[in-house]
Every structure is written in structure tokens, then in C-alpha cells.
């Protein structure tokens, strides 16, 4: 069985990934690795942040042979993603800053609450007409194989380079528009404000079954699943 270590503690994200990829994989998360170091997401692209998270976690796990033993008969990968909302009228913002959109206005560190981020977006869009409210969710997934000891027994620099060289990238987008008011309670993040093209309901109203079929993360994960099956 292929093991995927998902580089997140976000329960919503984990359940979404599980629901899309299905039962053919064994899943672990950062909740299973409480001592894993935190990664600073300071890249200016989704791909850069996803790659950084996947590679740094892969390096750390591979350096813990006593606590994480790789079985010869299994394949193990680190899966990390970075995703966010790109609003055309805001020149692509909040983009990589989606999780801390509201916090950018203060000296607070860390992510903002969903409510604060949504409130800021609605405030900026108070006078924006419907035809200029176009936006998209974008997701980029990095998949890094967990190198076994014999494959990474070189200098730390060479081993690090090898992790990066073997990392693969998968992306997906979902086009839509920003609504005038939040609606629905089934989603998280900007879901209550995002209405995907072809629908009248927000992501937070459509529910997991529809969202897991059309979302940006679903499209990126479908590419990843095809790769792993091959």
C-alpha cells in the first residue's frame, strides 16, 4: 500500500484529500508526527510554498529512522499543498496570503480567522459590480518521495538536492465569482463567498460531494492520483 504523509494539521483539508483519493492509500498527517518542525511559508508562489513544505518534511522524516521505519514493500510520499483565492479585481490577491489576508493590516503574526478574512474581502468589494467579481481558487500540490537511507546516504546538501529533484507538482483551479454576502455553513475559508461557475450556490452550500468533484484541490488531486496509479 502507498502511504501518504499529508503535511498539514488542518482537519478540513485532510478529510477533503481522503474523500477525493479514496481508500487505496494509507494516510498520516502532522498529527501523527507531533515533533515535526514548523515550516515558514515565505515563498511568493503556491508551488514554492508547497514544495518547501513537502521537501522539508521529507528531510526531517528521513532523518528519524528510529521513529519512522520505512517498510521495503511500501511506497511513502510526503504530500503538501498550498492553495488560496485569486481575485481578479485585486490583481490576484489575496493569493499566497489567503490564510492571513486580514492579518496583513495589523502587526499580528500567524493566520487570520475565516470570519476576518471574509469580512475584509467583502469590505474591499462593497462597490464592485457583478461582472468584475471574477475569481478562482488555485491549488498546487507537491509530492516528494521519502528516500530510504541507502538512497540519501550522502552529504546533507546532496540529499536535500535529491529530495527537491524528485518532487513533482500538480495544480488545479476552479473559476467562479465572489458573492455579495456569505451563504452556507458546510465549507471553510472563503467557501461561503465563492460561487463556482455553472452554479448559483456557494461552495459552503454545495457540500462535499459536489465540491470534491469540481474544486481546485479535486482537480490537482485527480492528476496526482493518475500519477500514483501509473
Image (tube, rainbow, N blue to C red):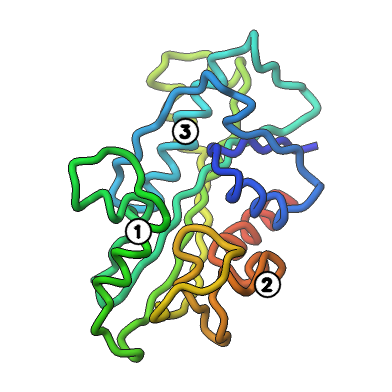
Q: Is residue 133 or residue 168 the one in the foreground? A: 133
Q: Which mark is residue 55?
A: 3
- Residue 7 higher or lower than 190, as above or below: above
- Residue 4 x %, y %: 67, 38
- Residue 143 x %, y %: 56, 43
- Residue 214 higher or lower than 72, as above or below: below
Distance from the alpha carbon under mark 3 to that under mark 1: 29 Å
- Residue 68 higher or lower than 139, as above or below: above
Which is closer to the viewer, label 2 or label 3?
2
Kindly identify which residue carries mark 1: 117
Mark 2 and 3 residues: CB-CB less than 8 Å, in contact? no
Kindly identify which residue carries mark 2: 210
Residue 173 placement, left or right of 24? left
Residue 129 placement, left or right of 182? left
Q: Which mark is residue 127?
A: none
Instruction: Give the image quarter of residue 109.
Output: top left
Q: Which secondary structure, mark 1? A: helix
Q: Residue at x 49, y 37 (%)?
A: 54
- Residue 226 higher or lower than 24, as above or below: below
Q: Residue at x 53, y 15 (%)?
A: 63
Label 1 vs 2, first from the N-terminus: 1
- Residue 221 x %, y %: 62, 57
Q: Which secondary structure, mark 3? A: helix
Label 3 vs 1, first from the N-terminus: 3
Distance from the alpha carbon under mark 1 to that under mark 2: 24 Å
Amino acid at each position: 500500500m502507498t502511504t501518504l504523509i499529508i503535511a498539514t494539521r488542518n482537519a478540513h483539508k485532510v478529510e477533503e484529500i481522503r474523500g477525493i483519493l479514496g481508500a487505496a492509500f494509507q494516510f498520516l498527517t502532522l498529527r501523527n508526527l507531533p515533533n515535526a518542525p514548523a515550516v515558514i511559508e515565505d515563498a511568493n508562489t503556491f508551488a514554492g510554498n508547497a514544495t518547501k513544505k513537502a521537501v522539508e518534511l521529507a528531510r526531517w522524516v528521513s532523518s528519524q529512522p528510529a521513529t519512522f521505519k520505512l517498510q521495503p514493500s511500501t511506497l511513502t510520499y510526503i504530500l503538501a499543498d498550498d492553495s488560496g483565492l485569486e481575485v481578479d479585481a485585486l490583481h490576484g490577491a489575496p493569493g499566497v496570503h489567503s490564510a492571513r489576508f486580514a492579518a496583513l493590516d495589523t502587526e499580528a503574526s500567524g493566520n487570520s480567522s475565516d470570519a476576518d478574512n471574509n469580512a475584509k474581502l467583502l469590505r474591499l468589494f462593497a462597490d464592485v459590480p457583478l461582472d468584475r467579481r471574477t475569481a478562482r481558487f488555485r491549488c498546487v500540490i507537491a509530492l516528494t518521495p521519502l528516500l530510504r537511507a541507502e538512497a540519501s546516504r550522502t552529504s546533507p546538501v546532496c540529499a536535500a538536492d535529491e529530495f527537491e529533484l524528485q518532487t513533482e507538482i500538480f495544480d488545479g483551479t476552479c473559476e467562479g465569482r465572489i458573492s455579495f454576502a456569505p451563504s452556507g455553513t458546510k465549507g471553510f475559508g472563503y467557501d461561503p463567498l465563492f460561487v463556482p461557475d455553472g452554479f448559483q450556490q456557494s461552495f459552503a452550500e454545495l457540500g462535499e460531494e459536489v465540491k470534491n468533484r469540481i474544486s481546485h484541490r479535486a482537480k490537482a488531486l485527480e492528476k496526482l492520483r493518475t500519477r500514483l496509479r501509473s
